[in-house]
Image (cartoon, grey):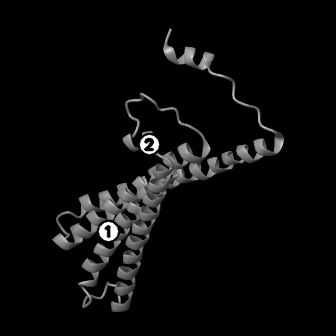
Amino acid sequence: MSAAPEARATSPAPARLRPLPGLIFASRWLQLPLYLGLIVAQCVYVALFLKELWHLVTHTFSFNEQQIMLVVLGLIDVVMISNLLIMVIVGGYETFVSRLELQNHPDQPEWLSHVNASVLKIKLAMAIIGISSIHLLRTFIEAGNLGSTNTNYTEAGVMWQAIIHGLFILSAIGIATVDRMGVTAANGKH
């Protein structure tokens, strides 16, 4: 017999909550449809990735290097957004709804073993910066063709996109700083 069932058998039964705290605590399950909706969005991104990959493969010999680079950057963008979705779905569910109980599962993501709200928000901020970086790089490449007729970028639009990207970076630094101050304060109390 394995140790896991014995451990559960000897652990005390969970405390029964009063009705109002029980209702409030159970309300976390209202997030389940949101996470399921994000899984549907993940499926849409898989379809978009496959469509763009097919577009790249079928036009390999007719695209120039810059066009190939833009399509590949689009593929990277889709992957990074998909990674962001996974972090929100798995990390959010584990943090705010219920444990996934993946201990000792060979495919458990390394980061999931130490996920909490602070770790999740820093990971999300970094993912958003990465996505913004890809968008900004694509904008710079496409804006380099200002003489071409198919570009929709103005100088002011590129400037604002760079400013917004800088604000994302400053926000991430602020989140990390506040998180570090909280950890330092918590360690000082022990």
* Mark 2 neighbour class, 10 Å CA radius: few under 14, some 14 to 19, many 20 or more: few
First in residue order: circle 2 vs circle 1 = 2
Count of numbered circles in the view: 2
Residue nearest the viewer, comparing 190 with 151? 190
Depicted 170 relative to depicted 13: above or below: below
Depicted 52 relative to depicted 170: above or below: above
Q: Give the farthest residue toward the top.
A: 1
Q: Depth-wise, is mark 2 or mark 1 nearer the camera?
A: 2
Q: Give the farthest residue toward the right.
A: 19
Depicted 21 relative to depicted 158: above or below: above
Q: Under tag 2, what secondary structure?
A: helix
Residue located 28% across and 73% down the image: 137
Residue located 54% across and 49% down the image: 92
Q: Amino acid at mark 1?
A: Ile
- In the rendered image, is residue 190 in sight? yes
Q: State the mark number for residue 38.
A: none
Left or right for 107, reference 43: left
Residue located 35% across and 72% down the image: 135
Instruction: Pinpoint residue 126: horizontal percent, then vertical percent.
Output: 38, 61
Instruction: Pinpoint residue 157: horizontal percent, then vertical percent.
Output: 38, 87
Task: Give the CA separation, mark 2 to mark 1.
Answer: 28 Å
Q: Amino acid at mark 2?
A: His
Instruction: Pinpoint residue 34: horizontal percent, then vertical percent.
Output: 61, 53
- In the rendered image, is residue 43 in sight? no
Instruction: Pinpoint residue 32: horizontal percent, then vertical percent.
Output: 63, 47
- State the residue position of label 2: 114
